[in-house]
Amino acid sequence: MAAGRLGSAAEADAVAALVAVLSANVPGSDAWLKLHAGGNLDALITGAVTRDASDAVTSAPVVWPDGTSGTYTATSVSSANPGAVDAYTVTWVGSTTKTATQSAVTRNASGAVTNRPAMTVS
């Protein structure tokens, strides 16, 4: 590959994939926030947890893997599946404040998630 030019679509795809992997390792980057906020939230939550009458976690403080603080907030709890959260936000309060948002999921009759929209960061 010539410096400064991509010789093929495959090379361009490889570079894009590498950039995505590297971005996912930069604390506070959108990719990094999506990776952690979309994964095991229990690993981020630290401190007092607030629950609703159905036992769904509605808010809690978080500490990100880089030590930055933030807040988890449920924005939609399931009425058909008590205790389940359908949508939430998690803030990262670093050099700027960013919010990772999981829009509402779709569930089947058994309560299993059948569609999970892509997480966004703003």
Image: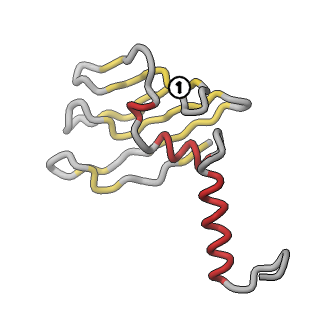
Residue nearest the viewer, comparing 80 with 96: 96
Indicate how the structure is coloured in the image: secondary structure
As drawn, 31 above or below 67: below
- Could you say where residue 5 lies in the image, as x and y percent from the top left? 81, 79
Rendered image quadrant of residue 114: bottom left
Rendered image quadrant of residue 79: top left
As drawn, 61 above or below 92: above
Numbered-mark total: 1
Q: Which residue is mark 1?
A: 63
Label 1: how many Cα within 10 Å (few below 14, some 14–19, many 20+): some
Q: Amino acid at mark 1?
A: Val
Residue nearest the viewer, comparing 107 with 22: 22
Which quadrant of the rendered structure holds the C terminus?
top right
Rendered image quadrant of residue 55: top left
Tell which residue pokes out farthest to the bottom in this image: 8
Tell which residue pokes out farthest to the top in this image: 48
Kindly identify the residue that appears in the image at 63 percent across and 36 percent down: 98
> What kind of element bears circle 1?
strand
- Could you say where residue 12 lies in the image, as x and y percent from the top left? 68, 76
Kindly identify the residue that appears in the image at 32 percent across and 35 percent down: 85
- Could you say where residue 20 lies in the image, as x and y percent from the top left? 61, 59
Kindly identify the residue that appears in the image at 59 percent across and 26 percent down: 67
Determine whether, in the image, residue 2 is placed left or right of residue 45.
right
As drawn, 4 above or below 122: below
Residue nearest the viewer, comparing 70 with 109: 70
As drawn, 51 above or below 17: above
- Could you say where residue 3 lies in the image, as x and y percent from the top left? 84, 76
Tell which residue pokes out farthest to the left in this image: 110
Which quadrant of the rendered structure holds the N terminus?
bottom right
Kindly identify the residue that appears in the image at 58 percent across and 24 percent down: 69
